[in-house]
Amino acid sequence: MHDLTFVHADAAHTEWQVALADCQRQLDTQDLLRQARLDHAPPLTLGWCYLSDYYALAAEAILAALQQNWPGVSWIGTVGLGVSASGVEYFDQPAMVLLAAPFPRGSFQLFSGRQPLPAASSGFVPHTALVHAEGSTPDVQELLHELSARTATGYLFGGLSSARNRTLHIADGVYSGGLSGVLFGPEVELVSRVTQGCQPIGPARAVTRSEHNLLFALDGKPALDCVLQDLGVERDAPVEAMAAALSGTLAGLNASTDDAPVQPGRFGSDTLVRHLIGLDVQHRVLALADQVEPGMRLAFCMRNAAAARADLERIATEVRADIEQSGGHARGALYISCSGRGGPHFGAPHAELQTVRGVLGDLPLAGFFAGGEIARDHLYGYTGVLTVFTSH
């Protein structure tokens, strides 16, 4: 692919018009520098717009302004409880982050409720896809499986919108419900990884009896007894004590047996973390916030800031090493993190994004804090999905 130079901007202000004007000045300046540096700088064609939920009600006006100022750019994005840029996060404040890239126009296609996936006869073969969606969409997991099957690699990346007022996503229009995003052809090179934010507190066990989201037995033992053992809580403890202990406990699920942690006490990338939502003391049963099937592997876990920081640094280092070994160059990045990971979970404001910048350098980056994270054909929780676009 031709040389890629991304441009990016971020701003926070109580009035979206002021923040947008600031971002557009940043983009204009960087674009002028880009054109001065390259003899034949290709035009910017694809832009990302991530808005904090303070700006959700103005999404149509913001998109219209972007389209007027950058008429040749196709815009995609969504809304989150927070948004992020290189080394900085804007959590629970009015802010926006913009990113734009000069991809060849034939190397990507947007999709949405108004723009269906291209037919096989179109000649466009999607290799990967960036997906924005809403958690309230019926059968969102099944839709992700179907979309994954329509790509050559099966690899999706993205996240669910998150907001206190209005969830939405953008694909040259503003949408509620369903999926939207962009399909990338083989010319768009990228490296992507998932980082976990939870740490196992006990062994991985086999699900031996379950029904729908009810977990009856692990390794042939009552499910409630297993989690109490891992937590060090007596089997006959008062119900209030059990509930208190379980309130911060999650379940890490894996459909296969080949995703054993690379190191003790760490999840592999295929582990899906789900909430415990109920217990039946009499029958020693647990209820999970997802379907669970016999044969799955399950390990109880808790959110852990130190483990999350170490794993984020690990996957960012892996991404950098992959790029260097291939002889490529990082051009821009997306980082989509769980809204439960921002700020306080990493110990200080901006710590999560500073960890990424500390490994990858001051790379143009845009992201948001999601209601669920998408990687491959899975919908994750308490994770971060880091994707770096490269060129050779």
Image (cartoon, rainbow, N blue to C red):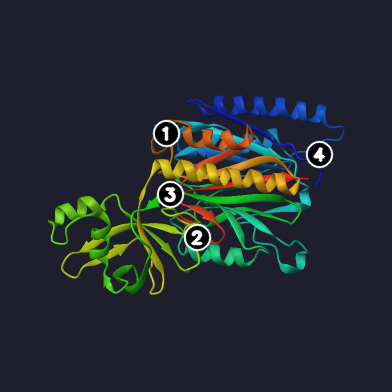
- Asked if disc 3 and disc 4 are in contact, CB closer than 8 Å, the reply is no
Label 3: element kind: loop
Q: Which residue is mark 4?
A: 42
Q: Earlier in the sequence, mark 3 or mark 4?
A: 4
Label 4: element kind: loop
Distance CA(mark 1)–CA(mark 2): 30 Å
- Asked if disc 3 and disc 2 are in contact, CB closer than 8 Å, the reply is no
Residue 58 seen in the current view: no
The circle on residue 382 is 3
Quadrant containing the C terminus is: top right
| x 74%, y 49%: residue | 326
Q: Amino acid at mark 1?
A: Asp
Q: Earlier in the sequence, mark 1 or mark 3?
A: 1
Where residue 134 appears, as percent x and y from the top left, is 48, 53
Q: Amino acid at mark 4?
A: Pro
Mark 3 or mark 4, which is nearer to you?
A: 3
Mark 1 or mark 3, which is nearer to you?
A: 3
Where residue 4 appears, as percent x and y from the top left, is 76, 40
Distance CA(mark 2)–CA(mark 4): 38 Å
Where residue 355 appears, as percent x and y from the top left, is 52, 36
Q: Which residue is mark 1?
A: 92
Q: Which residue is mark 2?
A: 270
